[in-house]
Image (cartoon, rainbow, N blue to C red):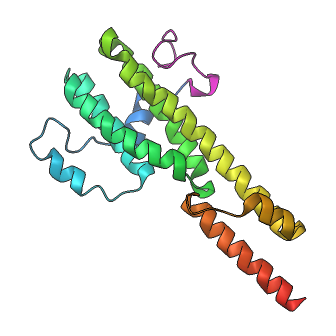
């Protein structure tokens, strides 16, 4: 909780205070099959959820492994977390903004709560989660602003839209889909004109 000194989580954000252990448990859910199981590799093959959900599952696994004193297994789950978190940071959609921000705050709190359980030599590995979650929050905010801007520009100024909002192949999927939709709407409007 909120009564610990700043540490793993860095300076604690005021809005993060007051997240209870039960809220963390409810949000992250059960760890399911953990890295200490012989069936873990099978579980990894069948992770079909979204990056948003899969990263929470990995955090639940990390929490369970750290609480059981199984640091190497926690690091294994951390690798999986990093893959899902990197993908989410790049692809987070405006529709997922609220959920991404909410779950990010809970994840940061959950990891901060584990600080005393993690040996000093290993703290840096897990501090990366805090940094990554802040990046995910920022990416969600930016995606939402880009979405608003591009929708407005498509109505007001198609040439400015073209300059600012036209997507490349490496743009997030939601942004490419938005561009396609708005470009089609512009073409339709021009046709009617």
Magenta region includes residue 4 = yes
Tell which of 144 and 173 is nearer to you. 173
Q: Is residue 55 left or right of residue 164?
A: left
Check the image and report above or below for 33 versus 152.
Answer: above
Q: Position of residue 157 (x, y in %)?
A: 88, 67
For image coordinates 12% across by 40% down, the residue present is 37
Above/below status of 174 relative to 121: below
State whether the magenta stretch is mostly helix, strand or loop.
Answer: loop
Residue 60 can be seen in this image: no
- Magenta-colored stretch includes residue 126: no
* Left or right, 60 with reference to 98: left
Q: Position of residue 146 (x, y in %)?
A: 72, 53
Left or right, 114 with respect to 175, comes to left
- Magenta segment, which residues? 1-17
Tell me where residue 73 appears, x and y as whole percent.
20, 30
Q: Is residue 101 above or below residue 44?
A: above
Residue found farthest to the left: 38
How many marks do you count on the picture? 0
Location of the C terminus (image quadrant):
bottom right
For the question of whether residue 47 can be seen, the reply is yes
Does 105 sit above or below residue 150? Answer: above
Q: Position of residue 166 (x, y in %)?
A: 71, 64
């Amino acid at each position: 909780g909120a009564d610990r000194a700043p540490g793993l989580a860095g300076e604690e954000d005021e809005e993060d205070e007051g997240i209870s252990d039960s809220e963390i448990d409810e949000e992250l859910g059960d760890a399911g099959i953990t890295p200490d199981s012989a069936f873990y590799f099978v579980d990894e093959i069948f992770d079909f959820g979204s990056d948003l959900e899969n990263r929470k599952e990995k955090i639940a696994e990390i929490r369970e492994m750290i609480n059981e004193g199984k640091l190497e297994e926690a690091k294994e789950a951390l690798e999986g977390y990093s893959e899902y978190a990197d993908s989410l940071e790049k692809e987070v959609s405006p529709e997922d903004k609220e959920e991404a921000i909410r779950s990010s705050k809970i994840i940061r709190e959950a990891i901060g709560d584990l600080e005393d359980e993690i040996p000093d030599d290993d703290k840096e590995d897990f501090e990366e989660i805090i940094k990554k979650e802040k990046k995910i929050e920022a990416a969600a905010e930016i995606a939402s602003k880009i979405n608003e801007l591009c929708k407005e520009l498509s109505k007001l100024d198609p040439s400015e839209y073209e300059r600012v909002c036209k997507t490349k192949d490496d743009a997030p999927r939601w942004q490419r889909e938005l561009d396609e939709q708005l470009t089609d709407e512009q073409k339709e409007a021009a046709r009617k004109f």
